[in-house]
Image: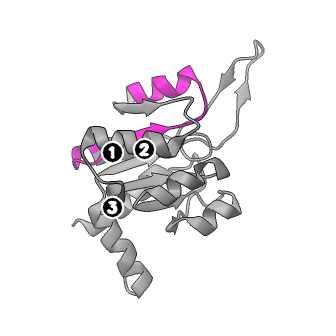
């Protein structure tokens, strides 16, 4: 996996990561909203991402969520996964990332951010390493360091976790 210059650069960035930050819709979910007869919107999360957060935590790598969406489902999912840094309703994701870095006493170049749409572009540029799902919008695909093999909601965070583990063995 790490044979050419770009791959070696990616590996070196992966070795620095102390925090993985995700958007929600389109990354941890497939971006779809499911409505019941009462108009309640539901989101589908992937259990592989849940295990990914657990494995990252066990390896000493923090996880965080920053999303512009305001949904109690996101808070419930973060609580279930023991993600301490869960921020909803955040339109300035870059500023929130910098606040988290200050709280954790880490540098933004030690952060891997996973986003999928144009409202993630500023924070993608701020993070030391960036990734997106395979079905992210073209502008994001062109801006990130790594485009995942998986689509949003299909285990993107777990794919990133496995990449991080592969360089730390």
- Residue ID for mark 3: 164
Q: Answer yes or no: do the residues labelled 2 and 1 have beta carbons within 8 Å?
A: yes
Identify which residue, 159 or 71, lies in the foreground: 71
Counting every numbered tag in the picture gives: 3
Q: Residue 57's spot in the image, x, y percent?
A: 27, 43
Point out which mark residue 97 bears.
2
The residue stretch that appears in magenta: 57-79
Q: Are marks 1 and 3 in contact (CB under 8 Å)?
A: no
**First in sequence: mark 3 vs mark 2:** 2
Query: 94 or 39: which is nearer to us?
Result: 94
Q: Residues within 10 Å of mark 2 (few under 14, many from 20)?
A: many
Q: Nearer the viewer, mark 3 or mark 2?
A: 2
Q: Tell me, yes or no, whether the two marked residues, 3 and 2, touch with CB atoms within 8 Å.
A: no
Q: How dense is the environment of label 3, judged by Cα within 10 Å: few (below 14), some, or many (20 and up)?
A: many
The magenta stretch spans residue 71: yes
Question: Of 50 and 10, which appears nearest the observer?
Answer: 10
Mark 1, residue position: 101
Question: Marks 2/1: CA distance?
Answer: 6 Å
């Amino acid at each position: 996996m790490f044979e050419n210059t770009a791959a070696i650069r990616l590996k070196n960035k992966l070795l620095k990561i102390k925090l993985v930050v995700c958007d929600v819709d389109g990354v941890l979910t497939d971006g779809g909203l499911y409505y019941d007869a009462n108009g309640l919107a539901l989101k589908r999360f992937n259990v592989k991402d849940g295990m990914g957060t657990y494995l990252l935590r066990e390896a000493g790598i923090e996880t965080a969520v920053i999303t512009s969406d305001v949904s109690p489902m996101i808070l419930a999912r973060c609580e279930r996964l023991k993600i301490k840094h869960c921020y909803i309703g955040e339109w300035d994701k870059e500023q929130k990332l910098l606040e988290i870095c200050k709280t954790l006493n880490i540098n933004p170049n030690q952060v891997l951010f996973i986003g999928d749409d144009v409202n993630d572009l500023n924070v993608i540029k701020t993070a030391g390493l960036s990734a997106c799902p395979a079905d992210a919008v073209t502008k994001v695909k062109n801006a990130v360091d790594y485009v995942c093999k998986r689509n949003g909601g299909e285990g993107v965070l777990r794919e990133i976790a496995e990449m991080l583990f592969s360089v730390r063995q």
